[in-house]
Image: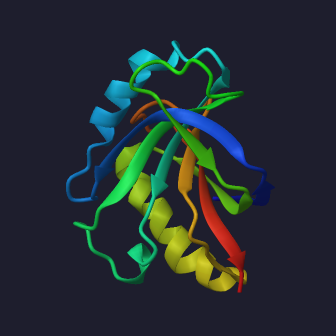
Amino acid sequence: MFSRIETIELRKLAGKQLSMSLANNQTGSLWAGFMPLRNQIRERIGNLLYSLQVYPENYFSKFDPTAIFTKWALTEVNSYDDLPAGIEPFLLPAGTYAVFIHKGDTNSFPKTLQYIFTEWLPLSGYQLDNRPHFEILGDRYKNNDPDSEEEVWIPIKEV
């Protein structure tokens, strides 16, 4: 499941956002609002899609399924010139990430996260950093299909 450690530079992304919680998950609505607009983004780079979460600073200190976070549906862009109505800019900060491969449908995703946070991270020599978490949905991503694959990017820093 663990793939690699990667340090990225600042990335320009553009898309839509919604505030939600795990208990009131609005991911389907978010993507339903983004997908019809993505081809109107003129400065788009490639076809990769980013499912990105911005969590409050102490979000992971105590599990609360009703805690609110911001989720984004995004694509990478060269510039923010001429973004279509309803599409917002998002700057993904530079930093180091642990990258994992999740294989399976949406229902198996919590098992991947459980492995990352309860097994891999405590033994890794890294700690969670307060930057966005994201998944990259590439060519192998098949929405809610058991054969789907996506990259899970977890922000880390050395202990």
In the rendered image, which quarter is residue 132 located in? bottom right
Q: Which residue is drawn at 56% across and 70% down?
A: 130
Q: Which of 103 and 137 is in front in this view?
A: 137
Residue 151: x %, y % from top left: 61, 47
Dividing the image into 4 quarters, which one contains the N terminus? bottom right
Q: Is residue 54 above or below residue 86?
A: below
Q: Give the left or right position of residue 28, taking residue 9 as reference.
A: left
Residue 147 seen in the current view: no
Residue 14: x %, y % from top left: 55, 33
Q: Residue at x 29, y 62 (%)?
A: 68
Residue 76 seen in the current view: yes
Dividing the image into 4 quarters, which one contains the C terminus? bottom right
Q: Which residue is drawn at 55% across and 51% down?
A: 134
Q: Which residue is drawn at 78% across and 58% down?
A: 6
Q: Nearer the viewer, residue 107 or 94?
A: 94
Q: Give the left or right position of residue 21, taking residue 126 as reference.
A: left
Residue 99: x %, y % from top left: 67, 57
Q: Nearer the viewer, residue 6 or 18?
A: 18
Residue 64: x %, y % from top left: 27, 74
